[in-house]
């Protein structure tokens, strides 16, 4: 599934994979945007290509924006992302890892409260773990909006995170400001 993740510029660029982005060179790109949905919970959180891209953008101070479930993909920048994700999926609380580039960053992601409320929409499925808990276990400083399902965007250095779908317009505005 991850190899099908596409980066596009409407009307200008072909659809390409993260592997191809790596081959072209991260320096050719100005920003990263990871949308929400459950896909980041399945593979992006432990993808080595995304981890390399995030580490490079972090080093270069380039804008990195993630929305709703998307911020869980930041775990891919962990030195042992696969093992950390496996522990979370097994219901364990792994020790806070050393060497995560986003440790101590203020950020948001869909809250545990919002995730619990949305469980019925999964058609009987369950989450392996909640993104808020996973990011906090890794060392993130989680910032939650007081009112569930309302807009909440947190900017800390190059990182721009939005808590839920209602945060999309404000996240886009922050990303555009960072690019100007």
Image (spheres, rainbow, N blue to C red):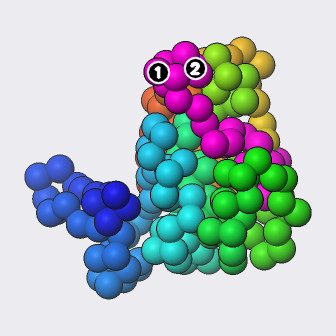
- In the rendered image, residue 5, in percent from the top left (x then y), is placed at 32, 58
* Location of residue 58 in the rendering, given as x and y in whole percent from the top left corner: 61, 70
| Crowd class of label 2 (few under 14; some 14 to 19; many from 20; radius 10 Å) | few
Q: What residue sits 77% from the left and 43% below the top?
A: 133
The mark closer to the camera, 2 or 1, is 1
Picture residue at 74% right of the left edge, 59% below the top? 87
Residue 115 visible here: yes
| Residue 158 seen in the current view | no
Residue at image x 46%, y 74%? 49
Q: Nearer the viewer, residue 12 or 8?
A: 8
How many numbered marks, from 0 up?
Answer: 2
Asked if the residue under mark 1 is in contact with the one under mark 2, i.e. CB atoms within 8 Å, the reply is no
Q: Is residue 175 magenta?
A: no
Q: What residue is disc 1 on?
A: 123
Q: Which residues are magenta?
A: 118-141
For residue 140, above or below residue 103: above
Q: Which element type, helix, strand or loop, lies under badge 2?
A: helix
Residue 38 place in picture, x, y as percent: 48, 40
Q: Residue 46: x, y in percent?
A: 56, 65
Q: Nearer the viewer, residue 10 or 83?
A: 83
Q: Residue furthest right?
A: 95
Q: Is residue 94 above or below residue 66?
A: below
Q: Earlier in the sequence, mark 2 or mark 1?
A: 2
Q: Is residue 119 above or below residue 7?
A: above
Q: Which residue is mark 2?
A: 118
Determine the residue positioned at 59% across, 48% down. Answer: 71
């Amino acid at each position: 599934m991850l190899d099908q993740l596409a980066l596009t510029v409407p009307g200008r660029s072909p659809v390409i994979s993260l592997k191809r982005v790596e081959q072209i060179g991260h320096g050719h790109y100005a920003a990263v945007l990871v949308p929400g949905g459950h896909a980041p919970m399945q593979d992006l959180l432990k993808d080595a290509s995304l981890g390399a891209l995030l580490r490079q953008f972090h080093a270069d101070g380039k804008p990195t924006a993630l929305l709703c479930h998307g911020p869980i993909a930041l775990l891919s920048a962990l030195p042992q992302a696969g093992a950390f994700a496996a522990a979370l999926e097994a219901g364990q609380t792994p020790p806070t890892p050393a060497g995560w580039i986003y440790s101590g960053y203020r950020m948001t992601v869909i809250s545990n409260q919002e995730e619990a409320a949305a469980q019925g929409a999964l058609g009987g499925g369950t989450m392996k773990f909640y993104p808020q808990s996973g990011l906090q276990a890794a060392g993130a400083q989680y910032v939650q909006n007081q009112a569930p399902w309302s807009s909440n965007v947190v900017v800390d250095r190059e990182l721009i995170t939005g808590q839920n779908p209602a945060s999309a317009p404000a996240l886009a505005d922050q990303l555009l400001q960072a690019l100007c």
